[in-house]
Amino acid sequence: MLIVKCQMLNVNCRQRGFTLVEVIVYVAILSLVMLLISTFIFYMAKSNFQSKGSRESFDSAQRALEQITYEISGAKSVYTPTTTQNQLSLETSRYLPAGETTTYLDFFLCGTRLCLKKESQNPVFLTSDLVQIANISFTQISNNGAVSIKTSLTVSYAHQLNNTQPTITLTSTASLKKY
C-alpha cells in the first residue's frame, strides 16, 4: 500500500535507517580506529616514561659524579682503612672542624642511594629518590706516584613500566691533589 501511495504521489519513499550490514561495517571501522588510537596513546606513554626515566637517571648520576670528582680533586689522599670497592674514604683539608688540620669524607651506598658523609656530620644523599644505584665501584689507579680514582656508577629509574626500567652507567676518573 505504501508503494502504491508513493507511486501515485511520484515521491521517493525509501525507508529511513541503517541495514544490519551497514551497522556491522560501522562498528568494525570504529573498533579499528579506537584500537589504533589506544595503541598510539600507549606507545606515547611508554616513550614519555622512558624519556623521563633516562633523563632523571642521567641527571642524578651526573650530579653525583661531579661531586665525587670535585672531592677527589681536592683530597690529600685515599684513606685506605675504610676504602673498599664500594666505598671511598678521602683525607681532605676541606670542611675542617675547629682546631683540626685534616678531616675525612666517605662516599657509600645508603640503601639504594649514594651518600656523602663528612666527618662528625650526618650523611647526605647525592642521588634523587627517583633513582636507585644499581652498582658503584671505586678503583684506585697509581701512575708514577700520581694517584687517581676511577668511579663507575650505574643508576636505574626507581619505577618500572612493563618490566622496563631506564638505566644508565657513567664513569669518571679524577686525580688527587698534589701537595
Image (tube, rainbow, N blue to C red):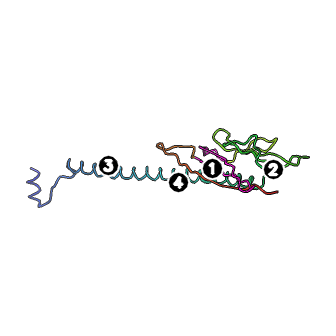
Circle 2 residue: 92
Pointer 1 with pointer 4, Cβ within 8 A: no
Q: Quadrant of residue 113?
A: top right
Residue at the front extreme?
144
Compared to 55, does 105 lie above or below?
above
Q: Main secondary structure of the magenta part?
A: strand
Instruction: Look at label 2 and name its amino acid.
Output: Thr
Closer mark to the observer between disc 3 and disc 2: 2
Quarter holding the C terminus?
A: bottom right
Q: Which residue is mark 4?
A: 51
User: In the picture provided, is 29 more to the left or to the right than 13?
Assistant: right
Which residue matches tag 3? 31
Gap between marks 1 and 4 measured at Cα:
22 Å
Report the front residue among 5 and 73: 73
The residue shown at (66%, 50%) is 151
**Mark 1, secondary structure of its residue:** strand
The residue stretch that appears in magenta? 127-155
Alpha carbons under labels 2 and 1: distance apart: 22 Å
Task: Estimate how packed mark 4 is, as few (under 14), some (14 to 19) or many (20 or more) residues with alpha carbons within 10 Å.
Answer: few
87 vs 134, left or right, is right
